[in-house]
C-alpha cells in the first residue's frame, strides 16, 4: 500500500477504520477507497487527508486474477485486516466477496426485526 509519512505514523498508533471501505480498479491499478486513517496528532500543515484513495501494490499476475474475478457478477474486493510486516511495511489483506441476493436480505431483515422485538419484550 502506498502511504504518506504521517499516515504510517498514524497507523502505528492504531488509528485506522475499515468502515465502508472497498477496492476498485482504476486505470489498471487497484485503489482502496473510504479507508479512514486519522490525522497524525503531531502532524503539521502537511498532514494527510484521512479518506483519500490509496494505491495497493500488487504484481501483474495478482492484478489479472483479481480483474477476471471482479468481472463476474456480484463480486467486490474488500479489505479484511491491516498489519505491519517485520520490515516495517504496512500490508493489507483483501478478499473477493459476493454481495447478498434479494431473498437473503429479506431473511436478514426478518431476523433483525424478530431480535429487536424480543429485546423490547424482555425490557417490559
Image (spheres, rainbow, N blue to C red):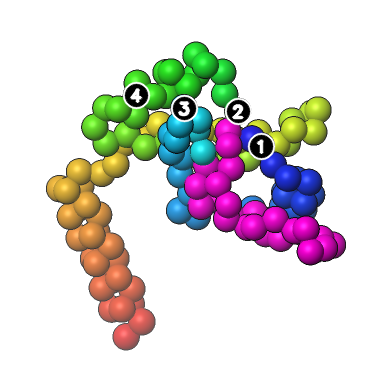
Q: CA distance from mark 4 to mark 2?
A: 18 Å
Q: CA distance from mark 3 to mark 2?
A: 11 Å
Identify the mark nearer the N-term, 1 or 4.
Answer: 1
**18 sits left or right of 101 in the view:** right
Looking at this view, is 96 or 66 the one in front? 66
Residue underneath mark 2: 57
Q: CA distance from mark 1 to mark 3?
A: 15 Å
Does 123 lie within the magenta span? no
**Residue furthest front in the image:** 27
Discs 4/2, front:
2
**112 sits left or right of 5 in the view:** left
Identify the mark nearer the N-term, 4 or 2.
Answer: 2
Identify the mark nearer the N-term, 3 or 2.
Answer: 3
Q: Residue at x 45, y 35 (%)?
A: 26
Q: Residue at x 24, y 67 (%)?
A: 113
Q: Residue at x 51, y 52 (%)?
A: 34
**118 sits left or right of 8 in the view:** left
**Viewer can see residue 17:** no
Residue underneath mark 1: 2
Q: CA distance from mark 1 to mark 4?
A: 23 Å
Amino acid at each position: 500500500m502506498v502511504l504518506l509519512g504521517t499516515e504510517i505514523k498514524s497507523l502505528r498508533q492504531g488509528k485506522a477504520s475499515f468502515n465502508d471501505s472497498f477496492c476498485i480498479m482504476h486505470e489498471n491499478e487497484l485503489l482502496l477507497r473510504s479507508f479512514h486513517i486519522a490525522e497524525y496528532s503531531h502532524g503539521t500543515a502537511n498532514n494527510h487527508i484521512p479518506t483519500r484513495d490509496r494505491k495497493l501494490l500488487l504484481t501483474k499476475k495478482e492484478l489479472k486474477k483479481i480483474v477476471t474475478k471482479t468481472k463476474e457478477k456480484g463480486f467486490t474486493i474488500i479489505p479484511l485486516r491491516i498489519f505491519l510486516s517485520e520490515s516495517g511495511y504496512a500490508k493489507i489483506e483483501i478478499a473477493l466477496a459476493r454481495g447478498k441476493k434479494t431473498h437473503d436480505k429479506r431473511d436478514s431483515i426478518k431476523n433483525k426485526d424478530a431480535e429487536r422485538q424480543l429485546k423490547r419484550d424482555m425490557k417490559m
